[in-house]
Amino acid sequence: MSLVTVRVTARGAARWTRGHPWIYRSDVRDHPSEAGLVRVVDGRGKLLGQALYSPKSEIRLRLLERSARPVDAAWWEGRFRECLARRGDLNATAYRVVHAEGDGLPSLVVDRYDRWVVAMLLSAGLESMRGTVLEALVAVLGPEGVLFRHDVPVRRHEGLPEEIVLAYGAVPEEIEIREGPVRYLAAPWSGQKTGAFLDQRPNRLLAGSWVPSSGSALDCFTYHGSFALHLALNAGRVTALDTSQEALTRARRNAALNGLTNIDWVERDAFEALRAYERERRRFDVIVLDPPAFARNKSAVPQALRGYKELNLRALRLLSPGGTLFTASCSFHVRTDDFDAMLREAAADSGRRCRLVLRTSQGADHPEILTIPETGYLKGAVLRAD
């Protein structure tokens, strides 16, 4: 089938040359009314590649293939096999198979939960290829079921409905998965993201090693208890905080699944709890701060940094001598330099001498491409306070 041809400006073409796959509306000369795969050329008619075209989005074109090779089921199967080969052994039964632009497949997210797959098609251009993508996913991954988690606001900008759709087979409400020595229940139909937070997996696997034998740990923003479970393998006692009783109910079930009885699940705001623990002069050997995104846009960054600083300042004051703080931000708009500056200020104000032990980021199954800053959002640090 012949493709519609779309011309772009020199500035638009330069974005692809410099390694970024997006071309914005203002750099597109032709504007077809239908979403789909298109052939993209420069002002002289030279082929630049094939792209996903979204007629209602500011991101009008997303680069998919630089040649004229047919983008058919065989093409998608080949790309999915390449993605799997890059993952290697992740010591877990739940991981990201496709990280959108990070894997050269813009606006597509595919997460595997044991024998099931949860995916997101986040652009109108990609949505037009839903059947082909699904066919290739089933052929390569061989799942028992595929669920499309399309209940995300970004689809509104593409003129697409927010929905949750069972696309193939059957997908249970809960899936038991393994992460190193820990098991927990993911919620593909109702949980955050596609059912669990997979990007912190390598840092959770490290968490148990931060706790001295029979030491104490505090996990703020615990959600389903993923960090707390790993901490509890070594700790004498873990306090896990969250404001959601529903999340804590699942966390308790996760603890029971692992036979762990040394976690206190506390329904409480983390800011409030840290202030109270400081007044009570409580001390912890390890504290984990993994909050939700504080900055949804650039204008929210200053306020977000103030929030991060308060959390980290109070956490540093609560650490036992030689204690460890793991702190993270999943806000894309809070850049690494801003995060580091915030930590320096918090350390200075705490009066503690803090040593940077390790910088962390998202797992290898969430690849970050240097020329595509949008692929990297998670940044973190392991600090030790004297």
Image (cartoon, rainbow, N blue to C red):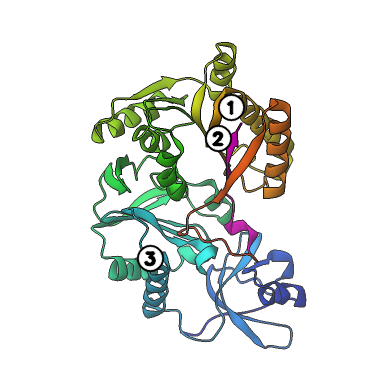
The tag earlier along the polypeptide, 2 or 3, is 3
With 320 as the anchor, is 24 left or right in this view? right
Q: Position of residue 144 (x, y in %)?
A: 23, 58
With 305 as the anchor, is 120 left or right in this view? left
The tag earlier along the polypeptide, 3 or 1, is 3
Q: Secondary structure at mark 2?
A: strand
Residue at the location (35% across, 51% down)? Answer: 165
Residue 88: give its label: 3
> Could you classify mark 3 by the number of other residues whose Cα lies within 10 Å: few (under 14), some (14-19), or many (20 or more)?
few
Q: Position of residue 150 (x, y in %)?
A: 44, 51
Residue on which disc 1 sits: 315
Residue 83: give its label: none
Rounded to the nearest angstrom, the CA distance separating label 3 from label 1 is 36 Å
Rounded to the nearest angstrom, the CA distance separating label 2 from label 1 is 7 Å
Q: Is residue 78 above or below residue 45?
A: above
Asked if the residues shown at circle 2 and circle 1 are in contact, with their CB atoms under 8 angstroms apart, the answer is: yes
Which residue type carries mark 2? Leu
Q: Is residue 68 above or below residue 200?
A: below
